[in-house]
Image (cartoon, coloured by chain):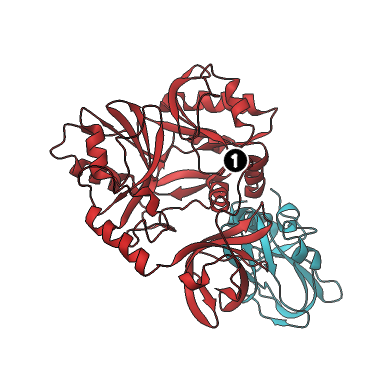
Chain colours: A cyan, B red
Amino acid sequence: MSNPQELRYSKEHEWLSGAEDGVSTVGITEHAANALGDVVYVQLPEVGAAVTAGETCGELESTKSVSDLYSPVTGEITEINQDVVDDPALVNTAPFEGGWLFKVRVTDEPKDLLSAAEYAEFSGS
Amino acid sequence: MSSNASVEPRRTALDALHRSLGATMTDFAGWDMPLRYGSERDEHLAVRTRAGLFDLSHMGEITVSGPQAAALLDFALVGNIGGVKTGRARYTMICRADGGILDDLIVYRLADTEYMVVANASNAQVVLDALTERAAGFDAEVRDDRDAYALLAVQGPESPGILKSLTDADLDGLKYYAGLPGTVAGVPALIARTGYTGEDGFELFVAPADAEKLWQALTDAGAAAGLAPCGLSCRDTLRLEAGMPLYGHELSTSLTPFDAGLGRVVKFEKEGDFVGREALSAAAARAESQPPRVLVGLIAEGRRVPRAGYPVVAGGKVIGEVTSGAPSPTLARPIAMAYVDAEHAAPGTTGVGVDIRGSHEPYEVVALPFYKRRK
């Protein structure tokens, strides 16, 4: 599997896009989606909610388990992906594309986010 | 990590094959087993609509033989095992003297004086020890045959056709819960019409050395019919939809068969004493006078999945506990099995919910099973 070069990654297996007008897109990696198995329910933060880097802001439920969703950055939620709420399987089929989770206006970004190569080494993917 | 992560897991004869298929592996009762090969939902639906192929070699086979094999099993188990005809199988249980369930079992009568007892992987040693201990004074031998067998299962509506193309055995004459020795794809096998999916299907007990050859032959024979390799994840959702109990979830040593709604497996009418008879008589009487919690089905109105151990609530009070829960691919809703107080157990009972990590989600109480195949 390949992790897109232009993204940055957290050790909780979220990806973060570059900012457009200060807003970044967040999702989970293909490696994380594969580890979860079929995702059946996605609970996302509300638009306007404040999220903090490294803290939980939602959950992902799969056939076998419930996993917390962490925000890779600190900021304010500007948009959530209603498509993925309606069809959680998008997380499995297109984790880096149609399965994105939320957009966030970033006020603070941790220094220890990983590059694609570093994440590949970290996750063995 | 599991607590026995330091112990090297046991691998089945098909281990290399699972890895070559890209299976996600998981520790199950000390065995490294395929959890899924791709999408567990797709595997589930393959079994419901076409056919699925499973490696179940972790199951515990125990051979009981000798002139008093039947008498021993009648004493050791709660069922009427002497009454099973040669070539037939029986679902039964082994209980402690206090009536608690040690395991649920399938017992195959292979010959007049030979039976095969199949225990759950997690209980195989417990069952083996109990049978060995209970065999004292009987002219019968209890043999651990876990390493003598690999077990493959073909389950789903297409499974009879797939198997027919590989064997001369009389499959049409093989009733549900029957087993006969035969040859499949040139491999000697015990062919049993049993399963844990709610579908028609077969379980094939073979020598481990023949397992890969048989798996490959079944894969090739099933290709046109859409047979898919299937892991333990979909096995769990299939059995849950079929309302079948899983030891450690719906069954445990703290429950008697009467508490589990399976009192029918206890055959008091059989002759002679059996382990647990007295305690189970008392449990049966208790169940008559004070109905215990009832195992029911729950269907979610929302999309959050109940999990084992979650409280079942009504009117703000805890009235039961979820034993198994999963998203149901067939119903496209989360489902669960739960033990609930008898007054809330009738199908259609309103006002029942599950406490899902702090929020009470509404659920519909239904009779089990959730899914029944058309015969």
Up-down relation of residue A10 to residue B178 (above or below): below
Q: How many marks?
A: 1
Q: Give above or below for A7 relative to B73.
A: below
Q: Quadrant of residue B18?
A: top right
Is residue B183 shown to the viewer in this render? yes
What residue is at 32 percent from the left and 31 percent from the top? B115
- Give percent across and percent down for residue A51: 69, 80
> Who's the residue at 73% across and 82% down the image?
A49
* Residue with the most extreme left position: B137
Q: Nearer the viewer, residue A43 or B293?
A: B293
Chain that bears disc 1: B
B111 lies left or right of A10: left
Q: Is residue A118 visible?
A: no
In the image shown, does B23 or B76 lie closer to the viewer? B76
Q: Is residue B115 above or below residue A40?
A: above
- Side of A24 relative to B241 (left or right): right
Q: Nearer the viewer, residue B310 or A96?
A: B310
Q: Quadrant of residue B207?
A: top left
* Residue B137: x %, y % from top left: 12, 38
Q: Is residue A107 above or below residue B221?
A: below
Residue B367 x, y percent position in the rendering: 56, 59
State the SS at label 1: loop
Q: Residue A27: image x %, image y %?
A: 72, 64
> Alpha-carbon neighbours of circle 1 within 10 Å: few (<14), some, or many (≥20)?
few
> For residue B109, what is the image quadrant?
top left
Dot 1 corresponds to which residue? B22
Q: Residue type at mark 1: give it.
A: Gly
Task: Left or right? Give the position of B207 relative to B139.
Answer: right
